[in-house]
Amino acid sequence: MTKSVRTFETSQKWADAAAEHFDQLAHQAVLQRGRFSIALAGGSTPRRLYERLAEPPYRDQIDWSRMDFFWSDERAVPPDSEHSNYFLAYEAWLWKVPVAAHRVYRMPGEADDVENAAARYQQQIATVLGHPASGPPPQFDLILLGLGEDGHTASLFPHSDVLAEPVRWVAVSQSPRPPAIRLTMTYPILNAARNVMFLVTGKGKADIMAQVLEGPHDPQRLPAQAVRPSGGELSWFVDRAAASKLTMM
Ligand code: 6PG
């Protein structure tokens, strides 16, 4: 695993750099394998990146039709809810670029039977990526993640049972904040990725950034610390405010 932490003076520079990295990874994947498989992050931070990818030059130079869009987690809300991670990406980005609509695979968080929804989503990942639906997970080209102020990522919350999930790639999770029920990718599939990008901005994340990157290793308390794509690249894209308590600054 290679790891990098890149900090940026302004949110514009942060968004430009993250978009440029996305573009490079997408170009490389399409060149080498004819496709780009990606799992999108939720919350609010990714919005600025998603909006930037819907602007020139990326809007016009990326081959959007080669992309398979998944999500790294979703809330138990309808896809048109303001709390939906799907809605965030669609409204900020996806409707503005020529994606292949049938290659956008929404995580069905609103399903009545969320356990079954998790299993169906795992099967969908396997089918689309041409991989056996059980056993070791497939390699996503890129997984985007955020960081909560409590150290969670995706919907992997501190001291939660899902942290110990050894086999399933997608599982049901309980959030301490509403919406409580979530679907989330688990460590096995996150840590199989070719590339993981953490997107972190704002002074509210300064404390947790310092704990996660420079504090004691305690992944039960700080789940983001256990995201370690063994055969891939882990990159942190952090603005100056969120990086302000890092000694490496
Ligand atoms: C979610 C996200 C979650 C998010 C962090 C950071 O569904 O909320 O997947 O993991 O990335 O909570 O959220 P902000 O970007 O809003 O700070």
Image (cartoon, rainbow, N blue to C red):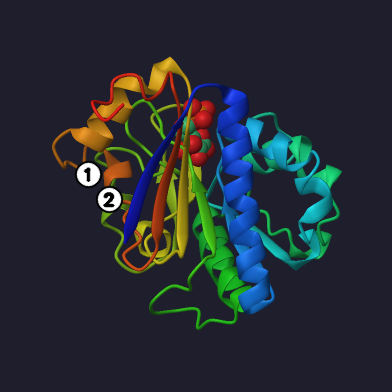
User: Would you place residue 110 above or below residue 148 in this image?
Assistant: below
Q: Which of the numbered marks, if any, corresponds to residue 219?
A: 1
Give 64 or 150, whichever is nearer the viewer: 64
Q: Position of residue 17 (x, y in %)?
A: 58, 39
Amino acid type at circle 1 is Pro
- Whether residue 112 is visible here, answered yes or no, is no
Looking at the picture, how far across and down is residue 230, in whole percent? Answer: 31, 65
Residue drawn where x is 16% and y is 42% of the image: 217
- Classify mark 2: helix, strand or loop: helix
Disc 1, disc 2: CB below 8 Å?
yes
Image x and y of residue 89, in percent: 69, 41
Q: Quarter of the image containing the N terminus?
A: bottom left
Q: Which residue is mark 2?
A: 226
N-term-proximal mark, 1 vs 2: 1
Looking at the image, the residue that sits furthest to the left is: 216
In-image side of 156 versus 95 (left or right): left
Figure quadrant of the C terminus: top left
Q: Decide if residue 144 is on the left or right side of residue 103.
A: left
At 75% from the left edge and 47% from the top edge, which residue is drawn? 58
